[in-house]
Each structure stands twice: as C-alpha cells, then as structure tokens.
Amino acid sequence: MADQIKIMILSGVREQGKDMFAVQVNDEIFVLDAGLKYPDSSLFGIDVVIPDLDFFEQYGDRVAGIFLTHGHADSIGALPYILRKYDIPVFGSQLTIELAKIDVKRENKKLKNSLFHVIDAHTEIDFKNASISFFHTTHSIADSLGIVVHTPAGEVVYTGDFKFDPSAAPNYRTDMDRLAEIETKHVLALLSDSSNAEAWFPSASEQDLEKYVTDVFRKAKGRIIVAAKASNLNRVQEVLNAAAATGRRVLLTGCDFAKIVRTAMKLGYLDVPDGLLMRVKDLKTTPDDKTVILETGRMGDPLNSLQKMANKRHSMIRIHKGDLVFIATTPSHAVETMVAETSDMVYRAGGTVIQLGRDKHTSGHATGRDLQLLIDILKPDFLFPVIGEYRLMEIHKNLAIKTGMKKEDVFISKNGDCYNYDFKKKRFYLTDPVPGEDTMIDGSGVGDVGNIVLRDREILSDDGIFLAVVTIDRKKEKIVARPQVTSRGFVYIKANHKLMHDSIEVIEKAINNNFEHKKFDWTELKQDVRNDLEKFLYKQTNLRPVVLPVVMEVNQNRHRAMQKLKENKTDNNTQGENGTPNKRKNSRSSQNHKAVKPRKWKIVKKNSKPTKETKDN
C-alpha cells in the first residue's frame, strides 16, 4: 500500500482562536492543538465556541493522539468536550498538561489521568507510521512547544503561537539550533502562526515591559486593579515583581486563576515572594496605596469583570475615586469597542485607565519579520498560514513570496479543508473536506444551539416576545376563557391598551376559524394563531416579536387517563425475557462515550537513553 499524507484544517483559520489541525500519515491521525474561542456580540448567550466534534465521530478510530503546543485556551480549551466522549491520549509539556487538567476537571469531575502524558522539547514519540518530536518556542506562557511530524515525504512543522525574542527568559526562549537541525531533514510543509503578520516593527522585549509595569506601579497613588489573562504567566510574573518592588500586596480574584497560579508556583514557573499574596478579608486593613487587585475574569475575560466593578455589581470589588485600572493585555480588534466602553465606565466611577497596548507594542505572536525569518531558516516546500483572520493569512502569504517562495506553494485555506499529498507530482491538492463547522457551548449544552436558535435570540434582542394564553374546549369547539396576552421587550403595555385588546380579538378569530373550517390539530391551531398575530402586530407596529401561543384544554382528565394506559402497555412490552423490565441507560456518558482504537507508541528521549517501555493506549 502506497504512503498517504494529509493535512487537515479542522479549525483556526480565517478567525482568531479555536486552533485545531491534523496530519494524517496512512491510517494514523495526529491532532495538533484543540482550542476554543470566545464569542463575539452576534452569538447571543453563547459561552464559548469549539471546533466541530463530528470530526472525532467520523475519524476517532484513526486518531493516535492530541499534541498541545501551550496552555492557553486557544490551544487546550476544547479538550474537556473532546475527552468527555473520546478516550484519546494527550501530549504536552508539564505546565501545559497541568493547565489542561484544570480545564478538563472543571467540566468533567472524573478526570482520567491516564490519558495525559508529559513530554518536553527533547522527546520523540514513535508511532506505527510516523514519529512526533518537539522544539522550544517563545510565547507569553512558559514551556511552549512547536511540533514536528516526521513523515515519509519530509517534516510537517506546526509552530503554534510563537515569536522571536532573544532576551526572553530560558523557559520562554526559542531553540534556534533545533530549528536549524529540523531544516536539514527537509521540511515538507510549515503550518505557521499568522496572528500578528501585519505588524512590522518588533515587539517590546519582556525586559522592557517589566520595567514599564514597575514604573506604572510606582506612579500610582491609590489601588491598582490589573486586568490580565490568567494564562499569560509572563505578564502575571511581571505584575507580581512590580508589586513586590513597590511594597504592595496582591489579591488574586477567581477560583480558576488561583488554581493556575498555585500550579505554576508548584512547578516553579512563577516566583511569588512570601507574604506578597493576600486574601479578600485583608482588603479592609491594607491601605489603598499598598494594594494590587489582579483580575482575570470568568473564562479569561477581565473586561466584563471590570464593567461589573465600575457599575457596583461585582461580588467583591467596586471601583472608587483614586483607583488605577491597568489593562495589561493587548486587546484584539474585535474587542476594541468593548475596551473603550469599559474605560468610559471606569472614569465615570472615579478611576483612571492605563492600557499597556497603547504605550507599548507588545504581542505574543510573530511579526512579519519573524515569519520571514522562520521561513528562511526552515525553507519549507509548502506554507499553510494558520491561526489568524483572512487578511492576516494573505499578508503572511505575501511575506512568504518576498522570501522567494512561489505563489502556488502557499495555501490560503478555510476550516474543513483537507489537502492530500501527491508523491508523484510532489504537490498538495484539495480533496474531500472534513468537518469544520463551529460547535457552540451554551451552559452545559454542547452543540445544542444552532442557527435557528441564534436567530430567535437575535429577534428577541431586537423586537422582544409576545405571549398569548388561551383555554379551549375542543369537544364543544369553543373558547372557555378570554385570551390573556402579555409581552416583554416589545411595547410598553400600559401605553398600548388598544393594541393588546385588538390582539385578543385576532386570537379569538383565528381559533374560531380553525374550529369551523379545519379538522382539529394542536400544531395547526397554534400555527394559525401565531401567523395571524405576527401579521397583525407587524401591521400595527412594524416590529416582529417572537410570538408564543399557549393553548390549554379543559376536561383533560379522560385524555390523560387514556395516555397513561397506553404508556403502561408500552412499558409491559419492553420487559425482558425473564419478566423484569429492561433497564434504561440514564448515564449520559454511558450512552455517548466512544472508545478509540488503541494505538501503540513509544517515547524516546533525545540525548538520553531511550526507554524500552511501549505504551498501549
């Protein structure tokens, strides 16, 4: 059988976040990252968005493992929902795996530690058809790794989020020697971060940023409320260092944030001096000029928490006169409006705002020059710009062409694209697509919310809801009680008595017409009421509220007794051969859990004695 190589773009292109890609070598699939993204304002009520889980439904028996580049939500955020249903081995650096466990345990109380495997930049994992190795990269979290899939046609390199910063601390530094070594083995394809491709000037070094943060703290006269991402441990360390240098104590808000900090401290990735951290009860006794509040917000969104503080709706903190709000993260273009609104609220509450992103050019992602340097080092045959919006991918493509790559060797893909490698022609070409739609998480529901539900939510936000309740006697074919109507978010009821009265007449007329001209059917009756009300309300107001007719029936005891009798007969028919009722599966996991075909793999440590252990997972 001839070798087969495919590159699958599962998620993370033409958008920001939700990174997940895959490389297939013969009958084994290696998934690279499994992230989420936070919804924009058009996704009403949605908590997070993850990649299409149908991929694992269709290809789960071929998936050899999930390989993680770093511990940010855009890389690990989808794991809780994947591992809830599929037992797939997960590989990552020590910090990445510990953060992934925190995420998974938040959604799934029963954490399967056997699925998680700690590797490092010197690890190589041998599978049946390919091997996987890693290399250090620079990002805003320690122990970030790039991934190399060794295939029969050459190396497929995935950078994850990265940048170049020669002054970075050892745990954050890119291994340039390793990149040069990878190039000597022939790089077939490069999947490279595009998030910051339009930036040309170099980002400020982390040493400069630490000095800047300390200067901000020294100039502040009152409390300092820092808004940062919990998983940006580099920035968290800079805030802790600045607090210690200026004689301030730090309050960490949020249970998940505290877990992340404790985990990073235990593993040695955060240095926290004794006595620096304080508890909520210490706020009353600690002077404002000695206080730092580090706010990360729910699910990594500090801006919502800042708004609650400014509007006096936060459970612990209220912004007051003299407070300095320091936004220590560079917001994406999608949330710039929200940053402006938040700043306005802070000023109204008496505080002031400093944004790091305005004073310093900083990013955890490669600039245009960094991307060109990486291409020049690795010399890939083909480039797949990933992790970024469409314009950024196009800019990345143009940057690659300037380095000497051919236009036809750079692929601007979309989610769901699958590229097959032709060994004879030595080219990639598009083949049948793979699942690449969004899966929306709303509360505990995974994928329950679709376009129809979102459209209804949009209508509710625009024109509100109109509720009509009526009781009928279908045997006598008459309305028993006068219909009751009410609305929310539609019109002010007290000022629209005539509209509400006339709508009652529309309901009565629709029901009577149904009794006279149609055979009784519950669905059809409600649809008639809904259609007539929608036409009437739009004619009167030019608004289209969501109309919900509730039709109830009197004298239902006989119908309920008949229904109960039918149910009893059905239950009797479902008894087992021994006369006992068959047990129903009540466990959600027992119904939906999918076993993944075990794959044999062996971890080999480079520059050390190889292990003889072979793991069957």
Image (cartoon, grey):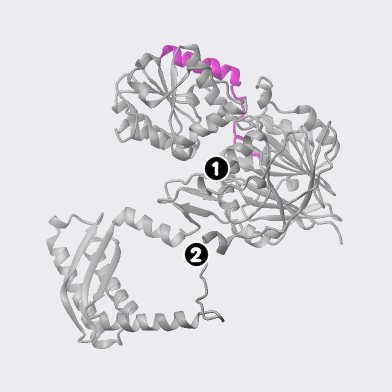
Q: Is residue 462 left or right of residue 302?
A: left
Q: Which residue appears at 59% of the width and 22% of the height?
A: 204
Vertical relation: 102 (above or below) 281: below
> How packed is label 1: few (under 14 Cα within 10 Å), some, or many (20 or more)?
many
Vertical relation: 598 (above or below) 339: below
Between the C-alphas of marks 1 and 2, the distance is 25 Å
Q: Which residue appears at 30% of the width and 85% of the height?
A: 520
Vertical relation: 389 (above or below) 609: below
Q: Which circle marks residue 103 in the picture?
A: 1
> How packed is label 2: few (under 14 Cα within 10 Å), some, or many (20 or more)?
few
Which quarter of the rendered picture does the N terminus lie within?
A: bottom right
Residue 547 drawn at (x, y percent): 29, 65
Q: Which residue appears at 63% of the width and 33% of the height?
A: 95
Residue 124 drawn at (x, y percent): 79, 40
Q: Nearer the viewer, residue 68 or 90?
A: 90
Q: Which of 299 and 325 is in front in this view?
A: 299
For label 1, the SS is helix
User: Which contiguous range is marked in magenta?
Assistant: 193-220
Residue 306 drawn at (x, y percent): 38, 32
Q: What residue type is labelled 1?
A: Asp
| Disc 2 target residue | 586
Q: Can residue 363 be seen in this view?
A: no
Q: What residue type is labelled 2?
A: Asn
